[in-house]
Image: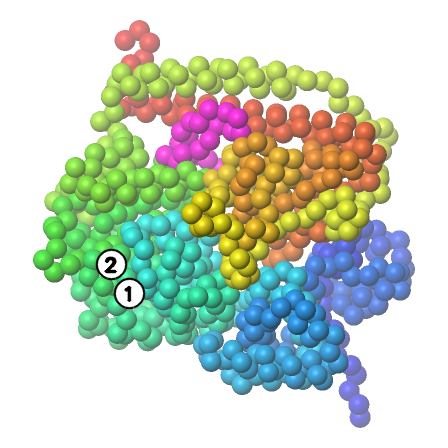
Amino acid sequence: MSQPPAPSAQVTAAEISRIAGVTRATVSNWRRRHEDFPGPSGGTESSPLYDLESVRAWLASRGHASAATPSEELRTTLRLHAHEGGGTSDLLLLVLAAADRSPEELTAATQLPDADLAARAQRDAASTADAVPTAEAVRFDTGDAAVLRALYACVRDEGGQAALGVLAERELEDSAASGAYQTPAPLADLLARLIPGSPDCVLDPACGSGTLLAAAARRGARELYGQDTLPVQARRSAVSLMLTAPEATVTVHAADSLRADAFPGLVADAVLCNPPFGVRDWGHDELAYDPRWAYGVPPRAESELAWVQHALAHLTPGGYAALLLPPAMAGRASGRRVRAELVRGGALRAVIALPVGTAVPLHVGLQIWVLQRPEPGGPERKSVLFVDTAADAATAAGRGGTAVTARTRGASRSASPDWAGITARALGAWRAFTESPDTYEGEPGVAHAVGVVDLLDEVVDLTPARLVRASRAGADPAALSVEADATRRSLAEAAQSLARTAGQEGWSAAGASAREWRTATASDLSRGGALTLLRTLPDSVRGRGQAASGRGGRPETRAVLTGSDIATGSGPTGEPMALHDDTAPVIAVGDVLVRGVASTDGPMARVAGEEDAGALPGPQVHLFRPDPARLDAWFLAGFLGAEENIAGASTGSTALTVSPGRLRVPLLPLEEQRRYGEAFRHVHALRAEAQRATRLAEETARLLSGGLTGGQLLPRGT
């Protein structure tokens, strides 16, 4: 007796909107107005799920061709593939092979018959199997044809990293309680930059997706070693690193680094690591006599101290390690003896506190521990550096404004981390300290070098906030008074400017109901020549082109504008990058810049000004170049950055990635566009003035409060 056909994968209403290229509200209207719209096949009343193939058939009957981006099409096809029992391990191998093919070869592959396509993909994936950990024999058949076509198309149009991200997202969903989180790229760059010099050989014993090793590769590392407990993360890391650092030697293994070190004889120039936190079953009993514990056996509840000593054991004498660690380990009683030995032995060089929200877990302010393996007969380490970037992060007063310093301890957790300020404070203090540790004077309230003898008390508490706060009394009263008075005057001027900007009138209601208009996607406008959509190519692709030479024939270095810069209104603050390819997009005045990750912490879009011109868009920034004869730039920025527009064009589960081609723009005459554009320009100015006034108010309050409690300022009448 024949079995009934299995149902296809299920999709949410939000996924239907992305497939059809419409808003979620449109999908809701279809459900209410069309009786033949497919009914829910699962889920709950508040979050229904719909049969994917039934939805596709209904859309086709209405003439709605799929408007999904290649990555979204791959994501949807993967759901169906997984529903039918297909895995993704072989597809990871295929991404690596496909990324090395030309666009023409990938297009030809998508046009092959099913059987030939499966055979071609099997050969491609098998050619890379030796490079990826725990890879098994590759097997594809005609049932995999749909997902193979989607993968080849995604690599061709969006690059290997985009396809890799979709595959890893699916595998991590299938890995029960993986607890895997990616280290933010700015934080990875900070850890890599804390390593002095240019290490060639770098190890990450908890490599995850390879973000830290990729940051090391960007700084010149050519031997990259990684290990991760999760096989999916090890495979993803290996493929990702081979894509982003094709000239480096990449070796990644899948195993528990503490229990089964894959590199027992490796001595690296540097170790970077964001280890798992709070793990009690890390092997305390079976590893009690492990030779790595040179500074004492880590307590059962202190797995982080095991990772610290694992890192030190893999360093060449004089080599450095930077680890991201939870704040509790700086003062927990159980780890006091090991902390004391790390300090006494000169292995701990710095502890840097980060603001809340910089990395998962977002509710606590993590710390960076910088360690150095002592050299036999090397110099005595007399002090340890402590930096509190959470209490003192440099920010800008706004585009066109005066730079100020704003302390953000009480800032909202929803605010985007000020990576430029955090990085400047941490690196500035660290470099000054390493240049002359014995004479380093520190910065009151920000950075302080504490003598080893002073740290070795009964608790050995290494919390930066506690140790840095004690240094504030060293501030000069006269200098603090002058700084507070100047900041107060700037605040008064900013408040007056904000009042003038907010006082503008002329807004009116649209009528009894909201105005409606016909819209077109950015992709449609691009095909029609009204705008050009540009993006920064991945390093693996850019590296294949000819270098664009600046002076002396070397690649020209340019500033980088990040998504955080758009949110905060600052100029380009990203780490300067070399312009390897003269076809790479360079920002020009009048370009519209849109953040690549959906968020509510600040504006999503802005028009490039003089201060942005010549910079490169960061990897999470989309660049739209409108034809001024057909599109007003401020009109375009206002609608592209609208909350509903961003939501409708975003995909993903945890981080919502904006698909730029799916953003929609009203079709209005140019003169009417300009009226809207002028209104959006005014809104932008209002937001900038408000941000500037807020920062100055926080700075003024901090200076006055700190001066009063520190004894540098006196109340009136005293």
Q: Is residue 563 visible?
A: yes
- Percent across and percent down for residue 87 are 60, 77
Q: Is residue 450 left or right of residue 638?
A: left
- Percent across and percent down for residue 182 are 47, 58
Q: Name the residue type under label 1.
A: Ala
Q: Are marks 2 and 1 in contact (CB under 8 Å)?
A: yes
Based on the picture, tell me whether residue 199 belongs to the magenta stretch.
Answer: no
Taking depth in this image into account, of 53 and 188 the one nearest to the observer is 188
- Percent across and percent down for residue 135 are 49, 80
Q: Please give the name of the residue rendered at 48% of the width and 28% of the height, measured from the top-left corner.
A: 397
Q: Is residue 232 left or right of residue 110?
A: left
Quadrant housing the C terminus? top left
Q: Please give the name of the residue rendered at 84% of the width and 68% of the height, measured from the top-left corner.
A: 57
Residue 625 placement: quadrant = top right
Alpha-carbon distance for marks 2 and 1? Answer: 8 Å
Q: Is residue 34 above or below residue 135?
A: above
Q: Name the residue type under label 2.
A: Gly
Based on the picture, tell me whether residue 404 belongs to the magenta stretch.
Answer: yes
Residue located farthest toward the left when viewing the structure as drawn: 377
Quadrant housing the N terminus? bottom right
Q: Please give the name of the residue rendered at 29% of the width and 19% of the height, measured from the top-left corner.
A: 479
Residue 268 numbered tag: 1
Residue located farthest toward the front when viewing the structure as drawn: 552
Which span of residues is magenta-colored? 392-413
- Percent across and percent down for residue 487 are 41, 19
Q: Which residue is identified by label 2?
A: 319
